[in-house]
Amino acid sequence: MPTYSHSQLSRYETCPRQYRFAYIDKIEVETEGIEAFMGSRVHDALEKVYRDLKVTKLNTLEEVLSFYHQVWEKNWNETIRIVKKEYTVEDYRRLGEKCLTDYYRRYYPFDQGKTLGLEEYMTFPLEEEKEYWIRGYIDRVTLVDGGLIEIHDYKTSSRLPTQEDIRSD
């Protein structure tokens, strides 16, 4: 049965040829964009915050930023590219710090619910009669008061989606 991820479908919507190169012809891309790299490092740090909370360790902001810098250095390599030449590696590193600092200050002490899962793999039918399925990972699943379950998807984009964007996505 055909199973697709959100990124596959988004890539197809953006450029069917790019989709073909990546998912049908399986042409390997040898570079990674700095935005994706920075977003992954922020994601790593937020995952650590909630993993550590499961064993009752509440990290300080300094510990979170230190971890962010460690995973940045560990994963940095020469295949990471910057398209927007007016920005430097340091600009992107600082943007990640700002994302983490803003998140930390907004949600500290991270007691808005009980984390049920981190990086949870999920699948669900898109069209059952045609047997099309969607697959992906949920960054964090949280149980909040009243038995409500929230799904968290961390983003580092400088642009917030509109309500219409969210409804149609």
Image (cartoon, grey):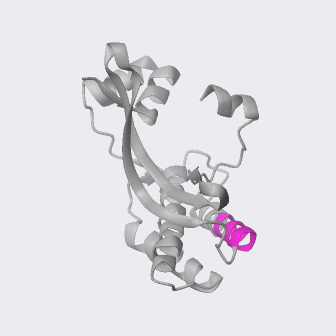
| Residue nearer the viewer, 103 or 151 | 151
Q: Which residues are magenta?
A: 98-107
x and y, in percent, of residue 41 in the image: 49, 64
x and y, in percent, of residue 87 in the image: 65, 55
Question: In the shown orientation, is residue 162 left or right of residue 92?
Answer: right
Question: In the shown orientation, is residue 121 left or right of residue 47?
Answer: left
On screen, residue 57 above or below 108:
below
Name the outermost residue toward the top.
129
Magenta-drawn stretch, dominant element (helix, strand or loop) = helix
Screen quadrant of the C terminus: top right
| Residue nearer the viewer, 42 or 58 | 58
Q: Is residue 74 visible?
A: yes
Question: In the shown orientation, is residue 110 left or right of residue 141?
Answer: right
Number of marks drawn: 0
Residue in the picture at 61% in, 64% down: 96
Residue 95 occupies which quadrant of the picture? Answer: bottom right
x and y, in percent, of residue 89 in the image: 57, 62
Residue in the picture at 31% in, 19% down: 131
Screen quadrant of the N terminus: top left
| Residue nearer the viewer, 132 or 11 | 132
Q: Residue 132: within the magenta?
A: no
Name the outermost residue toward the front.
146
x and y, in percent, of residue 37 in the image: 48, 56
Residue in the picture at 54% in, 67% down: 46
